[in-house]
Image (cartoon, rainbow, N blue to C red):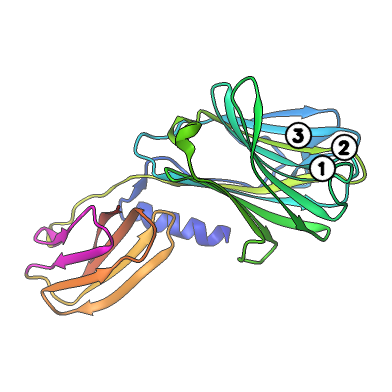
Amino acid sequence: MEKLIYSIAILLISHSIVLAQPNEYLTFEDNQVPAGWTFTPINSADISNGRLNAYTNDGRAKLSKSYTVESETQGFTIEWDAFVAYSFWGMGTHFSVFKGNERFIFSHQVEDNDYAADDLHLQIRYFDGTNQSLINEENIKFNEGVYHFKLVVDSSGYKFECFEEDNNEALQSLSLSEPENYFHFADIDSILIDTYAHTDNNAWTDNVRITINSPVSIEENSLFKMISIFPNPNAGLINIDFGNLRDVSITVFSVSGQLIYYKENISDPTYQFELNEVPGIYILELSAQGEKQYYKLVKK
């Protein structure tokens, strides 16, 4: 997976597509604190064996970073892997996003003292600087092992999901759909990973990935100067007028490099296609005569 992401990044840079804010992938393989982050171990905690570790007897591993959301950012996704096992007094991870003293806390935990022994407890909580309130919670049955967690943050709200390792179908999904009642994702100024273990089993977090949905800047190739793409922004239906250019291939990518749409060797002077994706920014690649040109598509 790392090689695939690296290859996509090289492809984008070589064709002058530049993300306004870089993505991050924390593997902890060098057992060092990632650049730009602050590590705060409490009691028994460290970064070792390629992981962020919290050990039993109230170990707590906190990794934090000041975070600036670019003005045109459409949103971002935070993913991480974590070990889940039995604990009477509790183990798990709190992932928080802050605006000053306010914060949202997205947590997964096992705690036999308050919940069933085989329940993995998921929560979204909000802290206003003084009081904390529970927004959403669910329990799922679990087996000891590694689970994957995903937090999607954009203008529509926050979505927190849990997956079994190597399974793309979410076991559970919690949502906060009215962020205007709290604070907008663009106001986030710091993030915190807080992994803890009180009794019975050690806890760890690994493979933290932050993917930014950001604007792009694109250089122009004179071969494509007669191209017209409309409407843009669009509601999903896109028209392309190729001018005098023929035998054009088109490819659409997400800003993270995922292939969305492909059509090759279009000989007609115009072409229309449907972008059946969620609102956001996408990259349109036109290829003809051995040359390529990229355009920013905005779906409303």
Which dot, 3 or 1, sits closer to the camera?
A: 1
Amino acid carrying label 3: it is Ala
Q: Give the range drawn in magenta.
A: 224-243
Which structural element holds mark 3? strand
Percent position (x, y) of residue 69? 44, 34
- From mark 3 to mark 2, how far is it between C-alphas? 12 Å
Image x and y of residue 140, in percent: 74, 57
Coordinates of residue 64 in the picture (x, y in percent): 63, 31
Q: What residue type is labelled 1?
A: Met
Q: Front-most of 292 and 75?
A: 75
Query: Within the magenta stretch, is there residue 231?
Result: yes
- Circle 3 is placed at which residue position? 61
Sequence-wise, the earlier of marks 3 and 1 is: 3
Q: Which of marks 3 and 2 is in front?
A: 2
Could you give the CA–CA distance between mark 3 and mark 1, rounded to whole angstroms?
A: 12 Å
Earlier along the polypeptide chain: callout 3 or callout 2? 3
Q: In this view, does 64 lie above or below 119?
A: above
Where, quadrant-wise, is the N terminus in this rendering? bottom right
Q: Are marks 3 and 2 in contact (CB under 8 Å)?
A: no
Can you identify the residue that label 2 sits on? 198
Earlier residue among tags 2 and 1 = 1
Task: Answer whether residue 256 is magenta in the image.
Answer: no
- Per the image, the residue denoted by label 1 is 91
Disc 1 residue crowd, few under 14, some 14–19, many 20+, Cα 10 Å: many
Three-letter code, disc 2 = His
CB within 8 Å, label 2 to label 1? yes
Q: Can residue 289 be seen in the rendering of this structure?
A: no
Q: In this view, does 128 lie to the left or right of 280?
A: right
Q: Residue at x 9, y 61 (%)?
A: 226
